[in-house]
Image (spheres, rainbow, N blue to C red):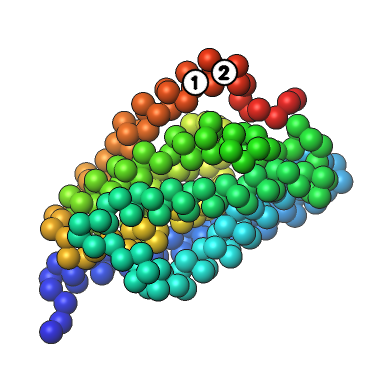
Amino acid sequence: MGPTPSQDWKTRSGKRAALALKMILAYGIVFTLLLLIFVSSPETDPNDRAIILMGVFALWICWIGVCGTMMYTYREKIKNFIGMTPDSWMLKFVLLATVLALLSEVFTVTATNLYWLFGGEYGKAFITASDNYFETVLLASVVVIWPAFVFWAWWLKRYDFHHNWVFLLYGTWGMIGEIMYGGLHQLYGAGMWIFTYGLMIYVPAYCVPESRPADRPRWYHYALTLILPLLFQLPMIVGVLLFRSAMGHQFPFIPD
């Protein structure tokens, strides 16, 4: 029996997203290589160079290169191991995405603590909110992004997005967040940011049961994924900011 019209449409949709991701990855790699050539100049500030090298090591090499390749290669085995059933998949989806987000921060915080290896100075060369892992994930990063995983679990219950689109859309959402926090120049690192965030949710989306009763998404359902996650994250963002203020924490926590 061949694929149904709905499955055929979904397959074509996934291929379009995959093509876009390949183009984004190619752009990201080329841009990063050019950036590495640029910062190799002796005139580059050592701390600026260290920050870029930290990002390349933690995100491009460890997270995207090693972990991303492993997730793609073993995605079917992970799917079988996780066993997302129609009754349990939403909770497992959120937990798995959160674990992957926590894992990504292992590499970034490690890179921050290796400032000396990259030629930087303590307090001046860092890529995380703190050199303490638990401060970073509980008061700055993962704590404010996990509600977006709750949104995607709810959204995928309603709409049958291909996992490649989930990767692309959540990755784009993550890039938008980096631009909102760090400025428009973060757009130059679009390839890195889209893959950094997209990989947090790719395997969870791949593991979602195909048999669930979900509707085919319309164009505006794609657009809404770049807006609605903020509504899920906003209460946590406000709560974390109030808590940090009450506890006297400054951002970033690393001293100037």
The amino acid pointed to by label 2 is Met
Dot 2: element: helix
The amino acid pointed to by label 1 is Phe
Instruction: Tell me which residue sits at (51%, 69%) in the image.
Output: 70
Callout 1 touching callout 2 (CB < 8 Å): yes
Is residue 177 visible from the viewing direction of this image? no
In the image, residue 36 sits, relative to residue 75, either above or below, namely: above
In the image, residue 9 sits, relative to residue 100, either above or below, namely: below
Tell which of 68 and 9 is nearer to you.
68
**Quadrant the N terminus occupies:** bottom left
Gap between marks 1 and 2 measured at Cα: 6 Å
**Quadrant the C terminus occupies:** top right
Q: Residue extending furthest bottom?
A: 1
Instruction: Tell me which residue sits at (31%, 66%) in the image.
Output: 83
Is residue 195 visible from the viewing direction of this image? yes
Disc 2 target residue: 247
Q: Position of residue 78 (x, y in %)?
A: 40, 68
Q: Position of residue 75 (x, y in %)?
A: 41, 69
Q: Residues within 10 Å of mark 1 (few under 14, many from 20)?
A: few
Disc 1 target residue: 243
In the image, residue 170 sits, relative to residue 250, either above or below, namely: below
Instruction: Tell me which residue sits at (39%, 61%) in the image.
Output: 203
Instruction: Tell me which residue sits at (13%, 73%) in the image.
Output: 4
